Amino acid sequence: MTTVKHQGFKVENVAKGKADWYCFTDLCKGCGLCIVKCPKKCLKWSKEVGIYQTPAVEPNPEECIGCGTCALVCPDSAIKVNKK
Amino acid sequence: MIQTLDVNPDLAKAQNAEAGASKFCPGCGHGMILKTLAHTLDDLELQEKAVFGCDIGCSLLSWNYMNVDSVQTHHGRTTPVIYGVTRANPGTIGIAYMGDGGGLAIGSQHLVNAAVRGENMLIVLANNTNYGMTGGQMAPTTMPGQKTETTPYGRDCEVTGKPAKGAEMVASIVDPNKAYVARASVSNLRSLRKTFTKALKNVEKGGFSFVEVLSICPLNWITNNEGTWDRLKTMEEFFDVKEFVQREGLE
Ligand SMILES: Cc1ncc(C[n+]2csc(CCOP(=O)(O)OP(=O)(O)O)c2C)c(N)n1
Ligand code: SF4
Ligand code: SF4
Ligand code: SF4
């Protein structure tokens, strides 16, 4: 198990409160591949920046269904969707 | 607001959690392939038995990616290095990871002979249709008409011959009773995980597995996020994504 702590931000209560969505900004390289694959088209560039000081990504919590597609495609494992 | 989070990323046990962000460019397919491979090693509980070899080219940037014994070797030579390890230590799950330049051009003789002899190993070949690390030159896999650094007007097959199709070539020379040969794509990582599962189960049974994965190289393709996925679709039209050889009894 890792003891490394990661930097990032949390978007609480996506999927009608059934999940929390996380972006690890020390892993996100701002490639935007996840944005294209999001089935709800609710993932957008964030005001927060990733490891290369380029925009990270952030979902609109009202529209995100917590499906985890973004986390699956991210080459850098920078997204996590925690079902509650 | 950015803060220290109390949760960890969803890394596989077979992935090195201490390494931090991978050395690949933003949006590189190598990360997708390797994280999927690592999760499959977890699924099959093969982490302790696995030895991972990476080639020259961007695949070498994975020298600290896996939480598995790893070795980095020269172009295409990852294949003989890994089956050497497997021959010396039977029961090892040997994995050779390479690009299309390393596997199908610069070190292709090793791939050919390992396939003909049915060496007990898994070869994973990432096909991004160019020589990534050296700046995006034409590779054997560059598609007809595709622009690269060395084919600025598009690949002209009259001059260069036709693109190499790795999985088809390997499929035509392996022993079908011992082999698993497939082409997959980073457009569907769930399906890639199933492909790796079969490939690794075949290695556990003593067989030879070859998986070519259609991959993406946004840096040298000079594509944005949408352009990258679109190019991958074009590749899937040119290179058949399917299983070519599957020995009996693999699921
Ligand atoms: C024998 C030899 N020739 C040429 C090179 C220079 N070289 C280093 S990486 C590379 C391209 C690798 O391309 P590929 O195998 O497709 O992998 P990618 O970087 O695209 O992942 C080349 C030609 C080398 N290292 N050794
Ligand atoms: S969890 Fe699904 S809906 Fe939510 S941002 Fe990710 S891909 Fe989009
Ligand atoms: S979360 Fe992952 S896929 Fe999305 S922009 Fe960041 S690095 Fe790219
Ligand atoms: S050059 Fe291409 S293959 Fe190499 S790390 Fe960058 S995106 Fe990946």
Image (cartoon, coloured by chain):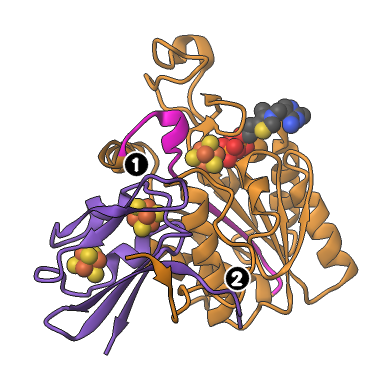
Chain colours: A purple, B orange
Residue A25 locus on image (x, y percent): 42, 60
Mark 1 lies on a secondary structure that is helix
**Start-end of magenta stretch:** B206-224
* Viewer-side label of 2, 1: 2
- Residue type for callout 1: Leu
Q: Which mark is residue B17?
A: 2
Quadrant position of residue B85: bottom right
Name the residue beneath numbered marker 1.
Answer: B232
Query: Can marks 2 and 1 be said to lie on one chain?
Result: yes
Tell me the quadrant of ligand 1: top right
Q: Nearer the viewer, residue B225 or B102?
A: B225
Judge the density around disc 1: few (<14), some (14-19), many (≥20) Cα neighbours within 10 Å. Answer: some
Where residue A13 appears, as percent x and y from the top left, is 19, 80
Dot 2: chain letter = B
Could you tell me which residue is drawn at 56 percent across and 26 percent down? B135
Q: Earlier in the sequence, mark 2 or mark 1?
A: 2
Q: Residue at x 47, y 52 (%)?
A: A51
